[in-house]
Image: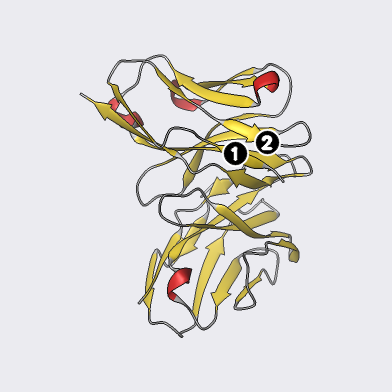
């Protein structure tokens, strides 16, 4: 069975500092990997996705993520965090035949200090 | 692209009552998913439709839960005889193809008292 682990429940960074959110997954085949962001009381918005090819993927809002097969990781990064980035971030792995049937991690809450 | 819409946004009900939620996906998307999210956790897959066919249901979906998508457009999720453990955010999402990411609605928050 597939699984996703986000080791950090809560991260606090200063505005303008760099950010890395960790994600480890378990899946028996080549995974579809996603990062979503959720603001309070809202649905999830896709930040970026990895299906195949280049292991460094660019997303919206200046985010990027790197797929490392040997480490089963898909960490999210941003070089300079803005106050509006404060939200909850979810990593997900989708099934190969049905990417929408995804298993999500429990999320990392990002707080941005002024 | 008007996005995925869900109605109602909030529902408070008493234990034992039935509730029904509606989801309108992005019009050109033929795949529709229901997820449940409880506080402090990520969304959990409940069920999905391709057009009007319900192709998969999670073991999380007890017999009290039923979902329909009668004409392959909007979908409804009904919970019968609600229990306090049903309190959660119910998220609907749609996608266009098998390898497309999900487009989520803003969810329906259910509180069972």
Q: Chain of mark 1?
A: A
In this figure, which residue is indicated by the disc labeled 2? Answer: A26
Tell me the number on the disc at residue A46: none
Q: Position of residue A21 (x, y in %)?
A: 46, 26
Secondary-structure class at tag 2: strand
Q: Position of residue B96 (x, y in %)?
A: 69, 46
2 and 1 marks in contact (CB < 8 Å): yes
> Rounded to the nearest whole Å, what is the CA distance between mark 2 and mark 1?
6 Å
The quadrant where residue A10 appears = top left
N-terminal-most mark, 2 or 1 = 1
Q: Residue at x 35, y 77 (%)?
A: B113
The quadrant where residue A32 appears = top right
Of residue A8 and residue A56, the one placed in the foreground of this image is A8
Residue placed furthest toward the left = A114
Q: Position of residue B99 (x, y in %)?
A: 73, 39
How packed mark 2 is, by other alpha carbons closer than 10 Å (few <14, some 14-19, many 20 or more), is: some
Determine whether A70 is above or below B44 in the image.
Answer: above
In this figure, which residue is indicated by the disc labeled 1? Answer: A4
How packed mark 1 is, by other alpha carbons closer than 10 Å (few <14, some 14-19, many 20 or more), is: many
Q: Residue at x 61, y 25 (%)?
A: A73
Horizontally, residue A34 falls left or right of residue A9, namely right
Residues behind callouts 2 and 1 on a single chain: yes
Of residue A93 and residue B104, the one placed in the foreground of this image is A93
Q: Residue at x 32, y 15 (%)?
A: A17
């Amino acid at each position: 069975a597939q699984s996703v682990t986000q080791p950090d429940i809560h991260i606090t960074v200063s505005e303008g500092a760099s950010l890395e959110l960790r994600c480890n997954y378990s899946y028996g085949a080549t995974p579809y990997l996603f990062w979503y962001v959720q603001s309070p009381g809202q649905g999830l918005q896709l930040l970026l996705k990895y299906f195949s090819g280049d292991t460094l993927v660019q997303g919206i809002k200046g985010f990027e993520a790197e797929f490392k097969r040997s480490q089963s990781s898909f960490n999210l990064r941003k070089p300079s965090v803005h106050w509006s980035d404060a939200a909850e971030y979810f990593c997900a792995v989708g099934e190969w035949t049905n990417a929408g049937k995804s298993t999500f991690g429990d999320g990392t809450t990002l707080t941005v200090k002024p | 692209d008007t996005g995925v819409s869900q109605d109602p946004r909030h529902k408070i009900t008493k234990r034992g009552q039935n509730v029904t939620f509606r989801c309108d996906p992005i019009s050109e998307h033929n795949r529709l998913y229901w997820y449940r999210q409880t506080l402090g956790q990520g969304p959990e897959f409940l069920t999905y439709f391709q057009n009007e066919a319900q192709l998969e249901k999670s073991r999380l979906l007890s017999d009290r839960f039923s979902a329909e998508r009668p004409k392959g457009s909007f979908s409804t999720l009904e919970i019968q005889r609600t229990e306090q453990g049903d309190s959660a955010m119910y998220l609907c999402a749609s996608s266009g193809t098998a390898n497309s990411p999900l487009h989520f609605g803003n969810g329906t928050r259910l509180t069972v008292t």
